[in-house]
Every structure is written in C-alpha cells, then in structure tokens.
Image (cartoon, rainbow, N blue to C red):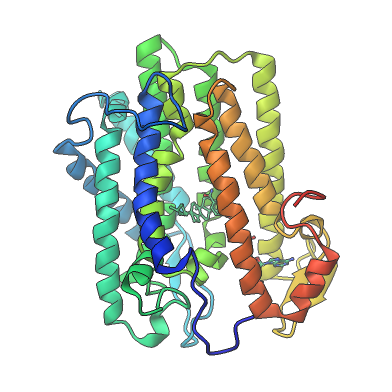
Amino acid sequence: MAPQGSPAPLEFGGPLGAAALMLLLPATMFHLLLAARSGPARLLGLPAPPPAPGALWSPAAPLLWLSWLGLQAAFYLLPARKVAEGQELKDKSRLRYPINGFQALVLTALLVGLGVCAGLPLGMLTDMLLPLAAVATLAAFLFSLLLYLKALLAPASALAPGGNSGNPIYDFFLGRELNPRLGSLDCKYFCELRPGLIGWVLINLALLVQEAELRGSPSLAMWLVNGFQLLYVGDALWHEEAILTTMDITHDGFGFMLAFGDLAWVPFTYSLQAQFLLYHPQPLELPVASVICLINAVGYYIFRGANSQKNTFRKNPSDPRVAGLETISTATGRQLLVSGWWGMVRHPNYLGDLIMALAWSLPCGVSHLLPYFYLLYFTALLVHREARDEQQCLRKYGLAWREYCRRVPYRIVPYVY
Ligand SMILES: NC(=O)C1=CN([C@@H]2O[C@H](COP(=O)(O)OP(=O)(O)OC[C@H]3O[C@@H](n4cnc5c(N)ncnc54)[C@H](OP(=O)(O)O)[C@@H]3O)[C@@H](O)[C@H]2O)C=CC1
Ligand SMILES: CC(C)CCC[C@@H](C)[C@H]1CC=C2C3=C(CC[C@@]21C)[C@@]1(C)CC[C@H](O)C(C)(C)[C@@H]1CC3
C-alpha cells in the first residue's frame, strides 16, 4: 500500500509502456479495420494492404468528423432533464453534470432518420471508416496535447492522482488534469459517453444499411450485432449518472489513453463485428440465434443487476431493494456489500459484460478469430482494470478490503478467477 502523500506508483509500464501503447493502439486499430475488409480476415498475420490507394484519407473526413463532434456537443449543451453532482473533489467542491445522454441518442436517431428519409446515403459512411479513423486518431493526439498544455495552468487541486509524474510522455498518455472543462462542457464526461458511443451505433447502422443495399436485406447476424450493441449503448446513456463514480471519472486524468479510447478506439474497433459481417456474410439459423440471444440476455441481466445494486446501495444504503444485504463496515464510514451480486464475485458486473462480449462475437460464426478480438481485448482490459481497482480499494479501505477479499475470494468468474 502506498503511504499517504507519496507519489502514485507508475502504471502501464511507466513512460516506456506509455510510449509503446501510443504507437501500438492506433496500429492495432488500423490493422483490425484493414483485416476486416480483406479476404482472409486474419487477426494474427501481416497487416492487410489498404483496399485502394488513398483509402486511408479523404478531404471530407475532417469536415464530417468535426460536424459530428459539434452536433454531439450541441446536444450536450441543451437543457437536461436532470443535473447531477459528481464525487467530492480535493478542494471539497463538486462538479455538476447534465444528464441528457439518452436524449442525445434519441435526437441523433431522429436526425439520422429524417436524413435517410430525405435521401441521405447512410450506407456510404462505411466507405469513409478508414479516413474517419485516421482523423479521429490525429484529433486524439492534438486534443491530448492541448489538454497537457491546459493542465500547466491548472491549480494543483485540479490534477489527477496519477498522470503527474513529471515525465511528459507518461503524463501525456495518462492525462494530468482530472476534469478539464471548456466552459460548462466537461471534456472527459462528454467524450466518454457521447461522440464515441453514439458514433459506434451509427457506424453499426450504416453497415446494416450497406448490407441491405448490397444483398437485398440485412442478415440475421447483422441484426443481432446491431441490436445487442444498441442495447448496451442505450443502457449506458440511460444510466449515464452511474459513470460519475467510475475510476475513469473519479481517478484517471484526461490524456491520450482516454481521448484516443473514447474518440477512436470505441467507435472504430467496437464496431468490428458488424464490419466483419459486411465483408464476410455468415449464415445463422434461428435456433442458434435464439441461444445467442439467451447468452446476451444472461450477460445483460448480471451486468445490469450488479451495477444497479451497487449504484442503489451507494446512493441510499437504506433503500428497501438493498437494505437486507450483508455489509462490511470500513474506516471511511462507507460500507462494502458482501452478499447479493457483490457476494458472488468481487466484480460481477465485469462477468456480465464479458458474457455479453461473447454474445456479440458468436453471430460472426467460428471460422475466424477476428470478430473475437473484442472478447480477447476486453478480457485483458478488465483483468488489468480489476487489478488497478483492487489497489485503489486497498488504499481506501485497508483491512476492511482484505476482509472482503477473504469472504469473496473470486474476482470475476466464480471458482475460476
Ligand atoms: N465496454 C467497455 O469498454 C468497458 C466497460 N466497463 C464497464 O463499466 C462498468 C463500471 O466498471 P468500473 O468502473 O471498472 O468498476 P465498478 O463499477 O466495479 O466499480 C468499482 C468500485 O465499486 C466499489 N465497490 C467495489 N466492491 C464493492 C462492494 N462489495 N460493495 C460496494 N461497493 C463496491 C468501489 O468504489 P467505492 O467504494 O468508492 O464506491 C470500487 O472502486 C462495469 O460494468 C464494466 O464492465 C468498464 C471498462 C470498459
Ligand atoms: C484505448 C485503450 C485500450 C483503453 C481505453 C479504454 C476505454 C476505451 C474504456 C475505459 C472505460 C470505458 C468505459 C466505457 C467505454 C470504454 C471505455 C471508455 C463505457 C462507457 C461503456 C458502456 C458502459 O455501460 C459503461 C459502464 C458506461 C462504460 C464505462 C467505462
């Protein structure tokens, strides 16, 4: 456990690891996008060449991408049904956040629907994915640089616990300022939920429309992938307030990792299954599709049940839905749930999320590894995230956390891990 006041331990392999990730993540993203379009669609293997010379760039891409960002920022600034307060900050203040993410999703859907009725060729967006990914990557680098410079002017109380090591590469990657804002727009909160997540379902929809144009109708596999991922994104925006207690908002600074993750990685790699299906159609029988729907439903049930149980408990421990659950008291005055979902494993929400990830890949068949990239990456991300959270909880709760680990020994999968 790091003693109070000592510098935060370096994560992600320090400056060298951060530099490697800044090269490796964009390279992986482009490899995946190119592989999905290539005949063999190999996850492991030499990078596929671009489908046409100049396919990685289009002058329309920066305009389209900036319009998208502007539209989502405008929706963010519209009056919200609710304004929520974030966690208490170092200077004892609390920031306020608009809860209108679901409204932004609905408004986007209406606008896109109107556009399609008026003849907008949505399917053509699929030809722009490579240039758009290039613009998003470039924008993530530039944006992170601006955020890094902005943090030089920020008071010490506004800096994140990590990301201020003094090494510019590491700090650029992790992010120095905890909650950088431009006026009333909170950059990290906005980026985490709006342009990337809504962009992801829009890309999926464009792939579905394109498939219908190419083959007469969308395939059952494409419907499933679109439906499952729309449910996931809709759920995230419906429960938008819950993100205010995640480590990304309360602990991590806003730097390249989250800027690239939110703006480029999420929309362009999370839509990989739908991209794969457009270029590699897969037959899917109804009985198999029903089993896959059942797997997604089980995953969603665990994911939502666990997240809602914790959120309800954190908001009001006397709420009748959670009042009967067993708890452990901690020295901070907060309690830890030790029965219900959180008594099964220490991260039941991760388990549900991973089961859903499997259901998103299964419609793509078992002939290729590429559509399973998300499941593999996500397993690694959650195992790493669980270890980071464990360290933070040990620092926060000390002995009470050790007692929780003793009573609930498994982290994510009961009796396995
Ligand atoms: N699709 C994607 O790419 C990603 C999805 N996710 C999803 O985001 C969601 C949020 O994940 P994340 O923020 O990592 O973690 P959690 O929602 O699991 O939050 C962890 C925190 O919960 C609190 N907690 C832990 N155990 C208990 C307990 N027994 N009782 C009460 N409180 C407890 C602690 O904070 P405290 O005590 O301070 O409240 C801990 O720091 C998950 O569903 C995850 O699957 C996450 C990353 C990426
Ligand atoms: C680029 C790197 C490999 C790492 C980047 C990580 C980010 C892509 C993820 C970090 C935490 C995330 C969350 C979601 C999306 C992915 C990122 C940004 C989330 C918004 C997805 C929807 C969920 O319901 C959620 C719980 C709201 C998620 C919160 C964390």
Give percent across and percent down for residue 231: 55, 39
Q: Is residue 263 visible?
A: no
Quick one: 362 or 208, which is closer to the camera? 362
Q: Is residue 402 above or below residue 112?
A: below
Figure quadrant of residue 287:
top right
Q: Quadrant of residue 294?
A: top right
Q: Position of residue 414 (x, y in %)?
A: 80, 50
The answer to whether residue 10 is seen in the rendering is yes
Does 353 appear above or below 410?
above
Residue 67: x and y, percent?
A: 23, 46
Looking at the image, residue 304 sits to the left or right of residue 14; the answer is right
Rendered-image quadrant of the N terminus: bottom right
* Pick the front one: 346 or 92: 346
Residue at 80%, 63% (x, y): give it: 320
Query: At which x and y percent is residue 337?
Result: 78, 67
On screen, residue 138 versus residue 219, left or right, reads: left
Task: Residue at 26%, 74% (x, y): give it.
Answer: 150
Task: Please give the count of numbered marks on the rendered protein.
Answer: 0
Q: On the picture, is 84 further left or further right than 115?
A: right
Ligand 1 position by quadrant: bottom right
In the displayed structure, does residue 279 sit left or right of residue 316? left
Residue that protrudes farthest toward the left in the picture: 59
35 versus 261 height, above or below: above
- Name of the residue lying farthest toward the top: 216
Residue sitting nearer the eye, 213 or 183: 213
